Image (cartoon, rainbow, N blue to C red):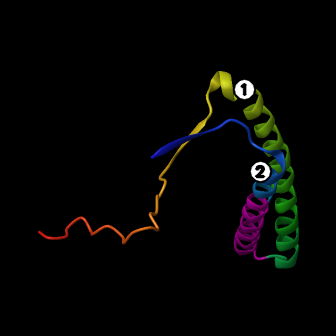
Amino acid sequence: MKIVTVTKIHFGPYIKWALVVNVIVGVLTGLSQGVVGYISTGQNLTGYLFWYGVGLPLLYFTIGLVGGSLFVFLYNSFNRSVGSYVIEVNELVINEQGPPPPPDDFGG
């Protein structure tokens, strides 16, 4: 098992995934809140879905952009003094020269 330490997070790939996740959460939250608002009041479903379905994803997008940017900046600045993410990785070594080894319960 190898241990990998994340010493730097690149802004572009991280922010793309952070924004995708935040928009998905915003859409699902907006739709659910729009439906709950309609069920509890029985009024304009289109208005609820529009304001919650468009407003919340935009809000979550903005929060994801600002929060993700702040996280990357703070992590890259302070990870050496505070501590970095440590990931354990299993490395599979394949010997292509010979046959595969027998299973653990072979022969007994």
- Pointer 2: what residue? 14
Residue 40 in magenta? yes
Q: Residue at x 84, y 56 (%)?
A: 61
Q: Secondary structure at mark 2?
A: helix
Task: Tell me where residue 4 appears, x and y as whole percent.
Answer: 57, 41
- Residue positioned most to the top: 81
- Identify residue type, mark 1: Phe
Q: Nearer the viewer, residue 108 or 31?
A: 108
Q: Residue at x 75, y 65 (%)?
A: 24
Task: Tell me where residue 27 appears, x and y as whole percent.
Answer: 77, 67
Q: Secondary structure at mark 1?
A: helix
| Quarter of the figure with the C terminus | bottom left
Q: Is residue 96 above or below residue 10?
A: below
Q: Is 75 displayed left or right of 93 in the figure? A: right
Question: How far separated are the C-alphas under marks 2 and 1?
Answer: 17 Å
Q: Residue at x 68, y 29 (%)?
A: 79
- Identify residue type, mark 2: Tyr
Q: Is 95 displayed left or right of 55 in the figure? A: left
Q: Residue at x 82, y 78 (%)?
A: 45
User: Which residues fall within the magenta stretch?
Assistant: 20-42
Q: Nearer the viewer, residue 7 or 11?
A: 7
- Pointer 1: what residue? 78
Q: Nearer the viewer, residue 53 or 80?
A: 80
- Residue positioned most to the left: 108
Nearest to N terminus: mark 2 or mark 1: 2
Which quarter of the figure has residue 76? top right
- Residue positioned most to the front: 97
Q: Are marks 2 and 1 in contact (CB under 8 Å)?
A: no
Residue 8 in magenta? no
